[in-house]
């Protein structure tokens, strides 16, 4: 498999996950880089102060925003909305690892083939 990039994170089966900007390494292949980088949690009220007034931001005690930054150069890698206490999501998981925990893409596709996006 060739290396690829999601957002600002480079995924390389041989070298692991790293920053697209500076090349700083976060973790090994198959790891969740969000567990190895700098992160910051924000309440919706904080976001309200930082975005244009044309955006509607609903405040809710169960919702937080998380920023993930490269620990080497400070680049913002991702910004996501979570429920308080929810674990960090994984952006990409190798198929063999997903299969080992019970993920079966073929069965899911057969259950709802019209809900999948395909590229031809």
Image (cartoon, grey):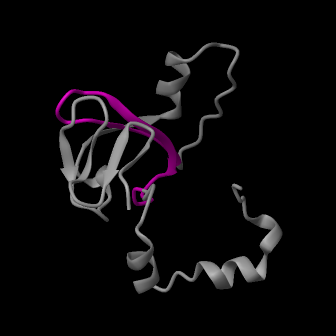
Q: Residue 86: percent from the left, percent from the top?
A: 45, 59
Q: Quadrant of residue 92?
A: bottom left
The residue lying at 50 percent from left, 50 percent from top is 82
Q: Quadrant of residue 73?
A: top left
Residue range (magenta)? 63-88
Q: For this view, does 120 lie left or right of residue 77?
A: right
Quadrant (top left, top right, bottom left, bottom right) of the C terminus: bottom right
Where 17 falls versus 97 (above or below)? above
Q: For this view, does 65 lie left or right of residue 108?
A: left
Q: Is residue 99 magenta?
A: no
110 vs 13, nearest the viewer = 13
The residue lying at 40 percent from left, 85 percent from top is 100
Q: Residue 24: percent from the left, percent from the top?
A: 18, 38
The residue lying at 79 percent from left, 73 percent from top is 113
Q: Count the numbered circles shown.
A: 0
Q: Residue 20: percent from the left, percent from the top?
A: 31, 35
Quadrant (top left, top right, bottom left, bottom right) of the N terminus: bottom left
Q: For this view, does 106 lie left or right of residue 24?
A: right
Where 49 falls versus 38 (above or below)? above
42 vs 29, nearest the viewer = 29
Q: Residue 28: percent from the left, percent from the top?
A: 21, 60
18 vs 74, nearest the viewer = 18
């Amino acid at each position: 498999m060739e290396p690829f990039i999601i957002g600002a994170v480079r995924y390389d089966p041989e070298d692991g996950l790293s920053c697209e900007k500076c090349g700083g390494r976060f973790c090994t292949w198959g790891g969740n880089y969000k567990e190895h980088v700098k992160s910051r949690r924000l309440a919706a009220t904080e976001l309200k102060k930082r975005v244009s007034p044309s955006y509607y931001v609903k405040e809710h005690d169960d919702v937080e925003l998380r920023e993930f930054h490269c620990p080497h150069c400070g680049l913002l890698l991702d910004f996501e909305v979570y429920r308080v206490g929810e674990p960090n999501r994984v952006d990409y998981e190798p198929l063999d690892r997903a299969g080992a925990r019970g993920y079966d893409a073929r069965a899911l596709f057969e259950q709802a083939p019209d809900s999948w996006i395909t590229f031809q």
